[in-house]
Image (tube, grey):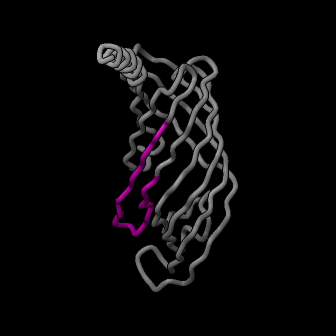
Amino acid sequence: MEKKFILILLIFGGCTVKTWAQQVGVKSNLLYDATTTMNLGLEIGLARKWTLDIPFNYNPWKPANGRRLAHFGVQPEVRYWFCERFTRMFVGVHVHYADFNAGGWPNWSFISKNMQNHRYEGELYGVGFSFGRSWILKKRWSIEATVGVGYAYIKYDKYPCAECGSKLKDGHKNYFGPTKAGISLVYLIK
């Protein structure tokens, strides 16, 4: 009886080791890097065509010019790869959470007057769908592009400017639109 039990444990243990020896990718989103947002993503192989991508981003900076883009965010995503994981095209379903403090942005044509003249502090939660592609550069290196659309519930407090004032109001907004964009450099660990 004891020998059979040990044999079953060895067989089960061997299967478990193989399961844990899945491929893993470590990545950085270059679009976040361009905004001085620190970010790190981890993508774990779940099965031949399935992965779990878990990106984190954090921006604590407060520039001297009064602008704000401080935030912490996470956006886990389950991906289905059409070829095999980490290769070519994929679709994904993601959820997202962010805590933000943003406002005082420059007077550029694509920036709303609200974001130029006010500061918003709050949280957002949501879900979305994405599509992407990965290109292999070398044996362990690749580059990945992804875009996503979805929904976010945004709960916020509004302030009169980036650095001053009492709260003007609190509110919430339902948002439908782009929820994900990335060009990431990926290093695969085997």
Instruction: Indicate whether residue 160 is drawn in magenta.
Output: no
Magenta residues (range): 53-73
State the residue in front, 79 or 130.
79
Is the residue 94 above or below the residue 154 in the image?
A: above
User: Residue 79's x, y, as percent?
Assistant: 58, 32
Q: Position of residue 103 (x, y in %)?
A: 49, 68
Residue 141 visible? The answer is: no
Q: Quadrant of residue 190?
A: top left
Which percent across, then down, holds residue 182? Answer: 53, 39
Residue 65 highlighted magenta (yes or no): yes
Q: Residue at x 57, y 42 (%)?
A: 181
At which x and y percent is residue 13?
35, 20
Q: Residue at x 48, y 70 (%)?
A: 121
* Left or right, 75 with reference to 110: left
Determine the residue positioned at 55% across, 64% down: 107
Whether residue 65 is visible here, answered yes or no, is: yes
Left or right: 10 with respect to 112?
left
Q: Name the outermost residue toward the right.
A: 176
Q: Main secondary structure of the magenta part?
A: strand
Res 141 quadrant in image: top left
Q: Is residue 41 above or below residue 115?
A: above
Along the line of sight, the residue nearer the viewer: 3 or 170: 3
State whether residue 75 is above or below residue 85: below
